[in-house]
Image (tube, helix red, strand yellow):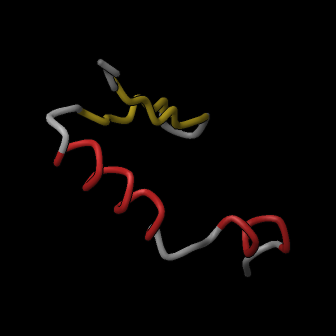
Amino acid sequence: MISEEDEIAIGTNLGMYLCKEFLEKHGQKIWVESVLGKSCNFKFYYTYV
């Protein structure tokens, strides 16, 4: 059974997909650092000239 909090967190990942496409299209990168059972950190590198 999924808790109400988890149900809110479940999504389509469309936002992450759009961020990835945008960053890669501009020669930048995005990655995830995670610790099993603890957390995930999504990081990106973007330079503005």
* Residue 39 relative to residue 13: left or right: right
Total labels: the figure holds 0
Coordinates of residue 9 in the picture (x, y in percent): 68, 64
For the C terminus, give its image quadrant. Answer: top left
* Residue 49 relative to residue 24: left or right: right
Tell me what residue is drawn at x 73 percent, y 77 percent. Answer: 2
Tell me what residue is drawn at x 31 percent, y 36 percent. Answer: 30
* Residue furthest to the front: 49
Coordinates of residue 10 in the picture (x, y in percent): 62, 71
Q: Is 43 placed above or below 3 here?
A: above
Q: Which residue occupies the foreground of this view, 4 or 20? A: 20
Tell me what residue is drawn at x 32 percent, y 34 percent. Answer: 31
* Residue furthest to the right: 4
Q: Which residue occupies the foreground of this view, 14 or 37? A: 14
Coordinates of residue 3 in the picture (x, y in percent): 81, 72
Tell me what residue is drawn at x 73 percent, y 81 percent. Answer: 1
Hey, which quadrant is residue 5 in on the image?
Answer: bottom right
Q: Which residue occupies the foreground of this view, 34 or 1? A: 34
Coordinates of residue 42 in the picture (x, y in percent): 46, 36
